[in-house]
């Protein structure tokens, strides 16, 4: 009798775990499609939710964490690659996890990492009509201007990338996928600029 009860409980637990896992996968896909539409992404991003079991968190409209991973994000004429958006203490309308429609996703804290490649940077410079070509080698950057090669120093001024060569500088506004997010650090290496951003009280508007 006890053995049958234990087996029954194990089966029930396995069924509930499978239902919870299925609900998580379905909700991650729904939200991924909403994020794709909201951020105008070419490809659907990967969305993962923290917190177990999932269903009670989803019904309460609160998650301990969520991560959005996109291969590419383009805005303001700038293309970022390998974008990873991590959110903590996430709040939302609970039905938005299972159905599409207008809504808000808020998080108390957030961080972002992304890569701006040499190719994409130069494409942005050309589209802005800036007459320089930037080359990254190791941890240094050089700019070719009118046939002359000059050392260039990339830096951040708020959410603006500043490329300084001597007394001349070029400024490029960097896209922020969520309200309340600001860039805090950059690093040059491997033919690209690695960017880091952080935020408090982040807000993402989901489309209708």
Image (cartoon, grey):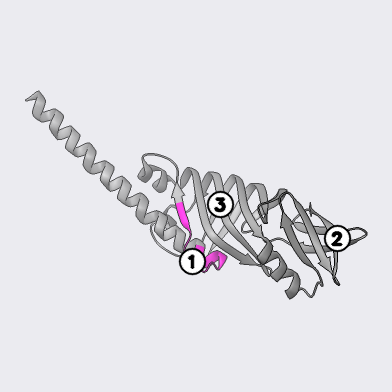
Q: Magenta stretch: give its range.
A: 36-47
Q: Is residue 155 left or right of residue 64?
A: right
Q: Give the number of the mark in front: 1 or 2.
A: 2
Q: Secondary structure at mark 3?
A: strand
Judge the density around disc 2: few (<14), some (14-19), many (≥20) Cα neighbours within 10 Å.
some
Residue at 18% x, 33% y is: 9
Residue at 9% x, 30% y is: 4
Q: CA distance from mark 1 to mark 2?
A: 37 Å
Residue at 72% x, 54% y is: 137
Quick check: 120 above or below 6? Answer: below
Q: Secondary structure at mark 1?
A: loop
Q: How many marks?
A: 3
Judge the density around disc 1: few (<14), some (14-19), many (≥20) Cα neighbours within 10 Å.
some
Camera-nearest residue between 37 and 162: 162
Q: Is residue 24 left or right of residue 157?
A: left
Can residue 44 be found in the magenta stretch?
A: yes
Where does the image place residue 95, in percent across and percent down from the top left?
Answer: 41, 56
List the residue tagged with mark 2.
150
List the residue tagged with mark 1.
43
Judge the density around disc 3: few (<14), some (14-19), many (≥20) Cα neighbours within 10 Å.
many
Camera-nearest residue between 151 and 14: 151
Residue 84 image label: 3
Q: CA distance from mark 1 to mark 3?
A: 14 Å
């Amino acid at each position: 009798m006890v053995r049958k009860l234990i087996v029954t409980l194990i089966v029930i637990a396995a069924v509930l775990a499978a239902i919870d896992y299925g609900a998580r996968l379905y909700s991650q896909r729904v939200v991924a499609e909403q994020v794709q539409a909201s951020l105008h992404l070419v490809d659907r991003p990967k969305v993962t939710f923290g917190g177990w079991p999932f269903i009670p968190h989803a019904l309460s409209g609160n998650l301990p964490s969520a991560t959005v991973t996109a291969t590419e994000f383009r805005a303001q004429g700038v293309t970022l690659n390998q974008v990873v958006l991590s959110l903590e203490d996430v709040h939302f309308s609970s039905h938005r996890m299972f159905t599409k429609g207008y809504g808000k996703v808020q998080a108390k804290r957030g961080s972002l990492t992304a890569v701006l490649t040499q190719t994409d940077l130069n494409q942005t410079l050309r589209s802005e009509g800036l007459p320089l070509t930037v080359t990254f080698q190791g941890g240094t950057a050089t700019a070719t201007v009118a046939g002359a090669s000059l050392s260039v120093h990339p830096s951040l001024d708020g959410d603006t990338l500043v490329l300084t060569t001597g007394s001349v500088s070029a400024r490029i506004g960097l896209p922020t996928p969520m309200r309340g997010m600001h860039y805090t650090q950059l690093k040059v290496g491997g033919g690209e600029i690695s960017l880091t951003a952080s935020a408090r009280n982040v807000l993402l508007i989901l489309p209708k």
